[in-house]
Amino acid sequence: MPNATVLVVDDEALIRWSLAERLKSDGYTVLEADTGRAALEKLSDGVDLVLLDYRLPDTDGVSVLRKMKEFDADILVILLTAYASVETAVEAMKLGAYHFANKPFNLDEVAATVERALETTRLRREVRQFRANAARPYSLQRIVGESPVITALRQLVAKVAVSPSSTVLLTGESGTGKDLVANVVHYTSDRASRPFMNITCSALPEQLLESELFGHERGAFTDARMQKKGLLETAEGGTVFLDEIGEMTPGLQAKLLRFLEEKSFKRVGGATDIRVDVRVVAATNRNLEEEVGKSQFRSDLYYRLNVLPIAMPSLRSHPEDIPLLVEYFIDGFNTEFRKKVIGATPAAYAVLQQYGWPGNVRELRNVIERAMLLSEHQRLDAGDFATMPRAVPAGDSFELPPNGVALEQLERSLVIQALRRCGGNQTRAGALLGLNRDQIRYRIEKFGLTATP
Ligand SMILES: Nc1ncnc2c1ncn2[C@@H]1O[C@H](COP(=O)(O)OP(=O)(O)O)[C@@H](O)[C@H]1O
Ligand SMILES: [Mg+2]
C-alpha cells in the first residue's frame, strides 16, 4: 500500500533504526516511539500499521495493543517478541493483533509481513468501497426534478462531492432537502465507505452536544464514568452533518471554529490534541448572514463554514417539478403500502400546483402519503386532496366590488391576516399569499409591520 504510515515501537534504538531504514526504503512513511505512551500519542498522526515490541519500559505490548484497537479498530498491529508464551500469543490474537514476529527477527520476513498486512487492509477498504457503491442509497438521482434550479443543484452537488474535504453550508427552508443533499454529498464522495454521522444542534443542551461532538475523558464531568469518543472521532475519514447549526451556542461555535481551522480538538476534560480527517456539512433554515448582523452567530465561523454554500430552492420556486416529485413519491408509497396507484389526474395536479407549499417537498411527500393511504382510486384525484389547506383563490374568482377597493389597504390587511394566522411565521404567511420570503418581508417593511403583529 503506497503512502502507508508504519509506527515502529521499541525501546532499543538500534532495532528501531534498522526497521525504520528498511521500511523507508520500501516506500513507507515511518514514525518511531520508544515507550507505550509515546506510541499511543503518535496514533493521532494517522497510522496504518504498528510494529510493537512486547517489552516496553513503561508497560507491556498487550495493553498498548488493547488501547490501540480502542483508538482505531482498523489499525494493524504486529507484535515483536523474544518471549512469546502461548498465553500471551492467544491473548494478543484475541485482541486483534495481526501477527507475531519472534526476536531476533529476519528483516526480510518482517518486511514481507508488513506488506501482506497492508495489502489486506487495502483489499478490505476496496471491498468496503465496492459495497458502498453497490448499495449507494444516496445517488445524485435521489434529487428529483428537471427544472433549471434542481438541475443546477444536482450539478453543484456533484462538484461539491468531488472536492471531498471542504466545508459545505446548506441553507434553505425546512423540507427543501437539506438532509437529503447532505447524504448525497457524502455517499457520492470518496468518503462514502466511511461513516456519515449526523447531529441536530438544537436537540441537545450545550454540554451534551459538546461531549457528543468532541467526546470526553473519564471524569470530565459527573456522569462521565468512561472515556467516550465523540462524533468527530467516530466519523474518521467520513462526514459529520451538523443540522440546525444556527442554534449552536456561542461557546460551542468558538470550539467548532477552532476545530475547523486546526483540524484537531481536545476531548472534554482532555489535554491531548486529537487530529481527525472529517468533512463537515452544516445546515440551517436561518439566514446566517442576518444572524451574523445581529451578533447571534460568529462571523468568522460563518465565513469558515461558507466555503461551499448550497442554497436549497423552495418548492414554490420550481412548481414545474411537482408532477415528477408526485410520481416519485407515488412509486415509493406503492412499494411501501403495497398499492397500485398509477399517477394523478390533471385536476389533482392543478390543485397541487396552485398551492404555496410552505413546508416544501416534505409537505408534498406527506400530502401524497395521506392521499395514498385514504384514496380508493387508481389515479389520485382532486378530491383526494380535499383536506389539504387551500391556496388563496387565484385570479378570476376574486371579484372586484362595485365601488372598487383601496388596493394598498387591502394588501396591507391581507398581509396582517396572513401573519396572524401563521403566528408571525413569515414564510408560512408568505405562502398563504403566494409570496416568497423576500416578497413578504418587503411588504412587512413597506407597511411598517412588525414581524409578529
Ligand atoms: N428534490 C428532491 N427530490 C426527492 N426528494 C426530496 C427532494 N427534496 C426533498 N425531498 C424529500 O423531502 C423530505 C424532506 O427533505 P429533508 O432533506 O428532510 O429536508 P430539510 O432537511 O431541508 O428539512 C425527505 O423525505 C426528502 O427525501
Ligand atoms: Mg432537515
Image (cartoon, grey):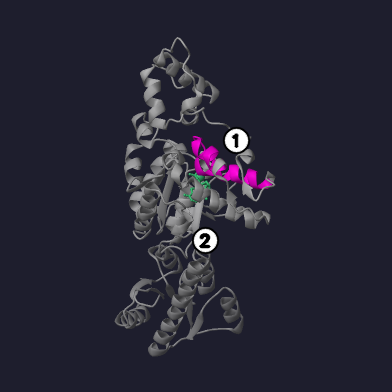
Task: Tell me the SS state at disc 1.
Answer: loop
**Relative to residue 379, is residue 249 depicted above or below?**
above
Residue drawn at 60 percent across, 54 percent down: 342
Q: Which residue is mark 2?
A: 137
Q: Is residue 366 magenta?
A: yes
Q: CA distance from mark 1 to mark 2?
A: 31 Å
Residue flagged by tag 2: what amino acid is it? Answer: Pro
Residue drawn at 48 percent across, 14 percent down: 401
Q: Which of the two marks, 1 or 2, is nearer to us in this view? A: 1
Whether residue 270 is visible to the viewer of this picture, yes or no, is no
**Relative to residue 286, is residue 412 depicted above or below?**
above
Residue flagged by tag 1: what amino acid is it? Answer: Met
Residue drawn at 39 percent across, 41 percent down: 254
Q: Mark 2, residues whose alpha carbon is within 10 Å: few (<14), some, or many (≥20)?
A: few
Magenta-drawn segment: 348-373
Q: Which mark is residue 158?
A: none
Of the numbered discs 1 and 2, the one sitting upstream in the chain is 2
Residue 24 x, y percent position in the rendering? 31, 79
**Quadrant housing residue 434:** top left
Q: Which residue is mark 1?
A: 388
